[in-house]
Image: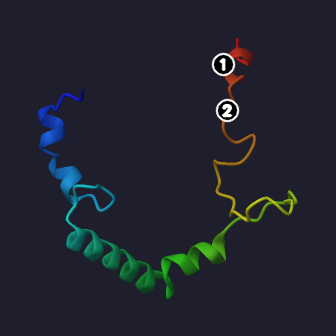
Amino acid sequence: MQILTPAKLFPTWKELFWRESETCLEWYAERQRESHRELWTAQYGSDDYDVNLETQVEVAKETGPGDPDVPFRIGSGPGLTPGVSFEIESF
């Protein structure tokens, strides 16, 4: 049985106006997304998606036929984040 607390019943103002929140009104979230697109278009002359395609980092590792072709993001590659053994090796 889930206990409802005031925090779950009444979202904060931050949650209400954050476009990724489930409690944000759909029309407001869409307006924020459109504003974000307009900002990127004004700054770079292209849409956010186009900027990501043009500036993505390529990986030298060859992917196999079953591996998805996922763009590499800095901070998510092997060796860039501490593994499970990080704590053990540091002592």
Horizontal placement of 73 versus 28: left or right? right
- Locate residue 58, reporting x and y percent: 76, 65
Q: Residue at x 57, y 81 (%)?
A: 50
User: In this rendering, is residue 33 above or below 1?
Assistant: below
Out of 58 and 71, give the one closest to the viewer. Answer: 71
User: In this rendering, is residue 63 above or below 90?
Assistant: below
* Residue extending furthest toward the bottom: 45
Tag 2 residue:
82
Residue type highlighted by circle 1: Glu
Q: Give neighbour class at mark 2: few <14, some 14-19, many 20+ (Cα, 10 Å).
A: few
Quadrant in which the N terminus is drawn: top left
Which quadrant would residue 20 be assigned to in this image? bottom left
Inter-mark Cα distance, 2 to 1 = 9 Å
Task: State which tag comes first along the sequence, 2 or 1.
Answer: 2
Horizontal placement of 71 versus 11: left or right? right
- Locate residue 15, reporting x and y percent: 23, 51
Q: Secondary structure beneath disc 2?
A: loop
Q: Which mark is residue 87?
A: 1
Out of 69 and 13, give the one closest to the viewer. Answer: 69
Residue type highlighted by circle 2: Pro
Q: Residue at x 29, y 74 (%)?
A: 30
Out of 65 and 17, give the one closest to the viewer. Answer: 65
